[in-house]
Amino acid sequence: MHDHGIIARSFVDARARDAVLRAYPGPLPASLSEAYQIQNEAIAYAGRRIGGWKLGRIRWPEAGRYGAERLAGPIFGDAICIPSGAQPVPMRVLSGFAAVEAEVILRLSASPPPDLSLEDAPQFVDEVRFGLEIASSPFVGINQNGPAVTVSDFGNNFGLVVGPAIPDAKTPGALDCLAALAIDGVTIGTGLVADMLDGPFGSLAFLARLMGERGLPLEAGQWISSGAITGVHPVRHGQHVRATFGDDIAIECVTMPALLPEGAQ
């Protein structure tokens, strides 16, 4: 088996066991193209339905080196939670690295073309919501070795909490509210959608192009987690996370181990 397959299987197997990887399981990918090849192999090996995609920002100077300002990874359908009430929902995190991110989430109404423009992107979205991405990996250094490493392990995604709808989200100014994220009652990050490169619909346009290049069409009903608004905030097991968007929208979760001890409920 070549290196890409070994790396892909190592990540998928470590996730299934909640094993901690203190070293990268193979040669570091030298490019985003190589990293997406590893991701493709991991998707095939995992054999799980993709329910959406996450986007992450690549900042300069790394954006210049890697030739992109964003990265993407799959969100598996069985890791997407849509709460039915206002109570915090339990979300599993891995023991290697775990973080939470407040995000604007788009639901696709149809499969967009690969040449999707920023201006046309809203036409392919039928819901805009506020939510939380669970960013987690077996590899403790997932965010410390460049974007190609992050891409290679499913873009560092482990789940998504789809929260309340943002009213009139496609109208000018509707996304101008301040987002904030608190862990155990302490606010640790705030931010504005306006500071996110070209915003959530720009994330969708980027993703459509990338998926066209990869031969992985986007599908109606998939959720697109468009990128961190307040930052990437590390968490541990058993922490309470609350994110707010403006004065009226909030979403909460409680982190828990990816695998519960035998006999635990």
Image (cartoon, grey):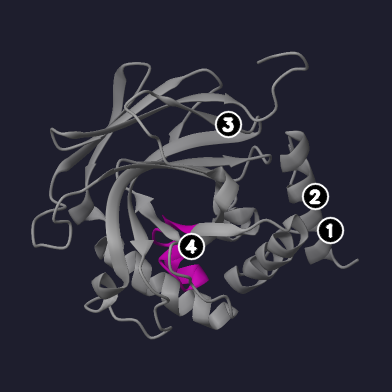
Of callouts 4 and 2, the N-terminal one: 2
Dot 4, how many residues are within 10 Å of its Cα: few (below 14), some (14-19), or many (20+)?
many
Q: Which residue is located at x 45 percent, y 61 percent? A: 222
Dot 2, how many residues are within 10 Å of its Cα: few (below 14), some (14-19), or many (20+)?
some
Q: Which residue in the structure is indicated by mark 2?
A: 10
Q: Secondary structure at mark 3?
A: strand
Q: Which residue in the structure is indicated by mark 1?
A: 6
Image quarter where the C terminus lies is: top right
Residues in magenta? 53-70
| Closer mark to the observer between disc 3 and disc 4 | 3
Q: Which residue in the structure is indicated by mark 3?
A: 92
The tally of labels here is 4
**Mark 3 touching mark 4, by CB under 8 A?**
no
Of callouts 3 and 2, the N-terminal one: 2
What residue type is disc 4 on?
A: Leu
Using the image, determine if residue 188 lies above or below residue 51: above
Q: Which residue in the structure is indicated by mark 4?
A: 71
What residue type is disc 2 on?
A: Ser
Using the image, determine if residue 89 lies above or below residue 66: above
Give coordinates of residue 67: x percent, y percent: 47, 74
Q: Secondary structure at mark 1?
A: helix
Of all residues shown, which one is farthest toward the right? 1
